[in-house]
Amino acid sequence: MNPALVHCPEFPRDSTWINTRRPLSVAGDLRGRVTVLDFWAYCCINCMHVLPVLRRIEERFAKEPVAVIGVHSAKFISEKDPENIRRAVQRYGVVHPVVVDSEHDIWERFGVRAWPTLVLADAAGYVRETISGEIDETTLAAKIDTLLDEGRRKGILAAGRLDVTPEPDTDGTFLRFPGKVHVAGGLLFIADSGHNRIVIAELDGRVQGIVGEGGAGGHDGPGAQASFHAPQGMTSDDTTLYVADTGNHLLRAVDLTTLDVTTLAGTGEKGQGMGAFDPAVPKGIALRSPWGLLRMGRQLLIAMAGSHQIWVYDTERRLIGPWAGSGREDHVDGPVAEAAFAQPSGLAQAGRYILIADSEISSVRVIDLEDSNVKTIVGRGLFDFGDQVGPPEKVLLQHPLDVAVGEGTIFVADSYNNKIKAIAFGAMETRTLFGDGNPKTLYEPGGLAVADGRVIVADTNNHRILSGDPATGALDEIRLAGE
């Protein structure tokens, strides 16, 4: 063995574990197995991109002594709570063991410096490679195969895979982690993200239709047979509902008369960067996690969370391309081509201003359509977050996922604070409108809409839709029934 190799550090004995009946150890459970340690945080879009890769790796090596272990190293305050991590594990379909690393103890032991980072350990228990950033399945599988071959030659591989059991999902609710909501023509559209479908209901909760057969997929066709994968943002015109099919990296359209689903843009594969592409061939361009949508005339604005940009799709000319944001993850105001966003996730319009929930920098940004400049209403940078209201310079949010506009007010889904905030036009003062931080009231709300003066809230982790009265602060559940 190369003396320069470092032995895999042991997990702290008092660590909290998810998706395993008992705590795991390097010496007792991982010896004899090629191990992939995934250092992630559930806020991070790049970490989300790695999870499907790991899922395919687990399937590919299902009969081999290969172990995938998630190490959840928090960025935001709320991400330190094991129950919040457990919800995220359920939401993203993680079935491998996850160890809670809220104070970055394991992160420091392995010398990790960024999200996401993969650490590969061989069957002898030595760290062989540290990989920062996203990785594709083929590259990762080749590295694992090399370590497996090495273990076979040395005769040190374990007899089988690691025996762990994912925690059961006991929610059993009609909705599962609903993301965005949209209201148009007296109807409420719900991105039932955890069930990979769109629910259409009256505002009183009477369900009128369901689009999507429920399994994760990207099939076009009749509504009952078509499929989505973790859909999020929606917007509409008189005839069509447009859907950001986030997990499929697609822009989809639902005919509001027939409920037939078609794909407008994207290949179904995750885009790797901003290489050359033909904007006139939208279905030939690989997108990166479209999350929020807003219709502006014949154009659809797309909060492209995975590329930290705002894209635009022309519904008549069928052209698509980036509009605002350099693609660098940062907090930079200025001309649209030079400005920088960080995981934009929600869009709304207030006159000449396009409002953006810029989640990873805990900010609300605007694009001024008159001078094509990006400006900041509240928020500062990647590590400036908290829960503080008041004048703009004092406000701190925590990973806001959506914005909506009411009479004289900007509503903000301050998701990780479990609150809905209200920013008053004019003075731009921020106050808490709904929620007290208790997850029983609101739990990581991810979507907002305004209807008849009320605020419609996707109470994501509580698997329900709420209707809030801004005048009284009362929140009532919209109970869905009839389908």
Image: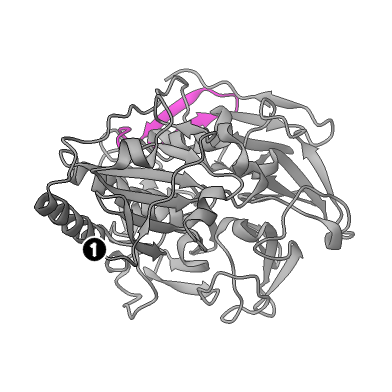
Whether residue 14 appears in magenta in the rendering, the answer is no
Rendered position, 418 above or below 175: below
Q: Secondary structure at mark 1?
A: helix
Rendered position, 409 above or below 344: above
Whether residue 208 appears in magenta in the rendering, the answer is yes
Coloring basis for residues: one colour
Q: Find the residue positioned furthest to the left.
A: 153
Nearer to the camera, 436 or 424: 436
Left or right, 451 with reference to 254:
right
Looking at the rendering, the stretch of residues picked out in magenta corresponds to: 196-216
Rendered position, 231 above or below 337: above
**Residue shown at 54% from the left, 63% from the top:** 297
Residue at the disc numbered 1 = 139
**Residue shown at 47% from the left, 51% from the top:** 40
Left or right, 418 with reference to 139:
right
Image mark count:
1
**Residue shown at 56% from the left, 81% from the top:** 337
- Based on the displayed image, in which of its 4 quarters is residue 474 positioned? top right
Q: Position of residue 129 (x, y in %)?
A: 33, 63
CA neighbours of label 1 inside 10 A, class few (<14), some (14 to 19), many (20+): few
Q: Position of residue 15 (x, y in %)?
A: 52, 36
Nearer to the camera, 173 or 384: 384
Q: Amino acid at mark 1?
A: Thr
- Based on the displayed image, in which of its 4 quarters is residue 164 positioned? top left
- Based on the displayed image, in which of its 4 quarters is residue 358 positioned? bottom right
**Residue shown at 36% from the left, 28% from the top:** 166
Image quadrant where one finds the C terminus: top left
